Image (tube, helix red, strand yellow):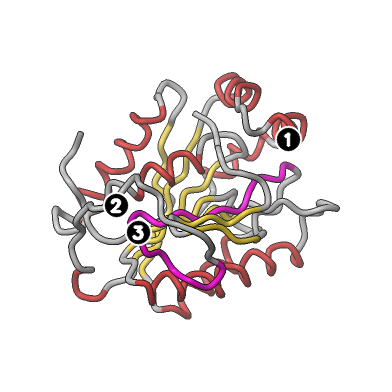
């Protein structure tokens, strides 16, 4: 299971736009957003709808709630792919935003975390105005790094949030990094940051998922099982 987003872009099902934000690691990832139905938000949005979910009927957001689902983990564990698969499974309008940055020079710092938070601060209200009930935010979001600035943004929006921590054993993680067809330029940096898997366990309240022996769809189902148990059928479609 690998992260598969195009470096340096933020894409929605209605188009694309430049963007960058992400965690304080030495392994730059990507910045991308995906809306789960046609007509996604229009600030940094471009060209035309995807056919993936055109015509799919979605229910209104229950009780006008706004839920932020954070998917964190070490670089290369499969956060982006899981997030993009996850949004298509909600019964309410949903979107995915990958907040890992592509910036040069790379330096883990408070300045970088502020960049990440500023990007979300600008982006999330647009998706909410579009009608999203759920936004899945993927990235290396760890305590003492990006987590606290992110939480400030979430609180300011009055949004409810939940964190899923994707874990993988060192061999499995290294294998995913090397096999990722979209991450060939980041292999060495990501391999140097595999130790961040241990920090995922330190994220307060994170729901830990060991993906070592799971395929991509199995990992999605593991998250969905917990989401479905909490939210019920009004928010999520049936299990596959």
Residue 167, magenta (yes or no) = no
Sequence order check, earlier mark of 3 and 2: 3
127 and 143: which one is in front? 127
User: Which secondary structure, mark 2?
Assistant: loop
Contact, mark 3 vs mark 2 (Cβ under 8 Å) = yes
Residue 38, magenta (yes or no) = yes
Task: Residue 180: give x, y in percent of width and height.
Answer: 60, 27
Task: Residue 112: give x, y in percent of width and height.
Answer: 73, 62
Crowd around label 1: few <14 · some 14–19 · many ≥20 (10 Å): some
User: Which secondary structure, mark 1?
Assistant: helix
Describe residue 166's horizontal placement relative to residue 108 as left or right: left
221 and 213: which one is in front? 221
Query: Residue 223's image quarter?
Result: top left
Main SS of the magenta part reads loop
Q: Reply above or below: 174 against 149.
A: above
Q: Which residues are magenta?
A: 27-44
Sequence order check, earlier mark of 1 and 2: 2
User: Which secondary structure, mark 3?
Assistant: loop
Disc on res. 186: 1
Disc on res. 54: 2
Q: Reply above or below: 158 against 59.
A: below
The residue drawn where x is 40% and y is 62% is 68
Q: Which residue is mark 3?
A: 38
């Amino acid at each position: 299971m690998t992260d598969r987003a195009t470096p340096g872009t933020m894409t929605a099902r209605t188009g694309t736009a430049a963007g960058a934000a992400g965690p304080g690691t030495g392994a730059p990832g990507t910045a991308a957003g995906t809306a789960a139905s046609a007509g996604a938000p229009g600030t940094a949005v471009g060209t035309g709808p995807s056919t993936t979910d055109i015509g799919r009927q979605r229910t209104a957001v229950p009780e006008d709630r706004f839920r932020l689902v954070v998917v964190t983990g070490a670089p290369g564990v499969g956060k982006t792919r899981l997030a993009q698969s996850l949004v298509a499974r909600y019964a309410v309008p949903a979107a995915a935003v990958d907040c890992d940055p592509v910036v040069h020079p790379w330096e883990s710092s408070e300045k970088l975390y502020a960049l990440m938070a500023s990007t979300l601060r600008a982006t999330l209200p647009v998706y909410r105005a579009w009608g999203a009930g759920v936004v899945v935010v993927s990235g290396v979001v760890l305590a003492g790094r990006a987590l606290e600035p992110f939480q400030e943004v979430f609180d300011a929006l009055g949004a409810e949030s939940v964190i899923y921590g994707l874990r993988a054993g060192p061999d499995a993680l290294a294998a995913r990094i090397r096999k990722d067809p979209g991450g060939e330029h980041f292999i060495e940096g990501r391999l140097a940051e595999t130790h961040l898997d241990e920090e995922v366990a330190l994220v307060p309240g994170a729901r830990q998922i060991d993906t070592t022996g799971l395929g991509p769809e199995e990992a999605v189902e593991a998250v969905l099982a917990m989401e479905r148990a909490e939210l019920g059928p009004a928010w999520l479609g049936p299990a596959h």
